[in-house]
Amino acid sequence: YDKASIEQNVPKIVERSRDLNLPVVCYLTGADFVNRDFEKEVARLHEEVDIAAALGVKLMRHDTTYSFPKGMTFDDILPIIAEGCRRVTEYAQTKGVRTMVENHGLMVQDSARVTALYHAVNHENFSLLTDMGNFMCADENSAIALGNALPYAAHVHAKDFLFKSGDGENPGEGFFGTRAGNYLRGAIIGQGVVPVKQCLRLLKRANYDGWISLEFEGMEDCVAATDICLKTARYIWDRV
């Protein structure tokens, strides 16, 4: 949808959210400051901020890039994506919206890179969205990575994965490759290898008081699986 068509539906979404007592806690959108026209991408994200503000959402997550141009490294693109994030968060601050980048998309996914980006942006309105499962896409231990990034987090995603070593055969349908060539498949929380209990304990120990959004990316029925994820996550949270 374009901005105009989305804005037509904002009042309906707000009303439905209120009726269900299910607040929209974070507005998410893609972005690529490196492979798209930089100024146009910044302007487009300003429009996304307008939508988040119209929804009454206080948090907005956007990406930075999905691939490095040939011959470029993370160090090469860091100034570019940091400038894009800074330009967006400066505008968002005037709308009462805090912006974040998630560890997402392989290129900017491990804790070293997202924390480097956080420090490069260096703006009071900019934070991180830490996804405890996504660190595994960059072949990083989720608990260690979450501990590294948590001081800068304003929102958290909880999810779980099944894991197969890249030393073996491709496990087939439903699995995808990590940066180092291992294989992951979405799982119901508590049924995979992500140390969910340890990650939730880290959040409690840090007195994290923001939202935790559950993500289910597995092959089971999504409604039934998400219900199990919610029950399991609450059970673990109450006991860590």
Image (tube, helix red, strand yellow):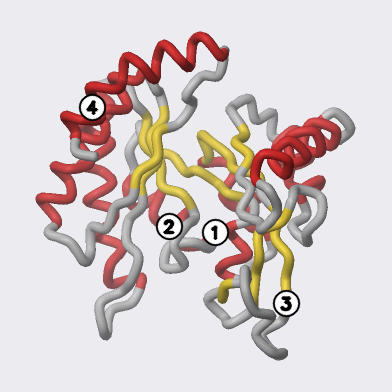
Q: For the residues carrying marks 4 and 2, which lies nearer the camera in this image?
A: 4
What residue would you read off at disc 3? 164
* Callout 2: SS: helix
Image location of residue 196, percent across then percent down: 76, 48
Label 4 with label 1: CB-CB less than 8 Å: no
* Callout 1: SS: helix
Identify the mark at residue 116; answer none if there is no mark. Answer: 2
* Callout 3: SS: strand
Quarter of the figure with residue 59: top left
Distance of label 3 from label 4 (alpha carbons):
42 Å
Q: Residues within 10 Å of mark 2 (few under 14, many from 20)?
A: some
Distance of label 2 from label 1 (alpha carbons):
8 Å
Distance of label 3 from label 2 (alpha carbons):
29 Å
Quarter of the figure with residue 215: top right
Three-letter code for the amino acid on which mark 4 is drawn:
Asp
Label 3 with label 4: CB-CB less than 8 Å: no
Of 180 and 86, which appears nearest the observer? Answer: 180
In terms of sequence position, does the residue under pointer 4 or pointer 2 come before the other? 4
Q: For the residues carrying marks 1 and 3, which lies nearer the camera in this image?
A: 3
In terms of sequence position, does the residue under pointer 1 or pointer 3 come before the other? 1
What residue would you read off at disc 4? 50
Three-letter code for the amino acid on which mark 2 is drawn:
Ala
Image location of residue 11, percent across then percent down: 32, 14
Identify the mark at residue 111; answer none if there is no mark. Answer: 1
- The vertical placement of 70 against 4, above or below, is below
In the shown orientation, is residue 236 left or right of residue 155? Answer: right
Q: For the residues carrying marks 4 and 1, which lies nearer the camera in this image?
A: 4
In terms of sequence position, does the residue under pointer 4 or pointer 1 come before the other? 4
Of 236 and 100, which appears nearest the observer? Answer: 236
Image location of residue 125, percent across then percent down: 35, 32
Distance of label 4 from label 2 (alpha carbons):
27 Å
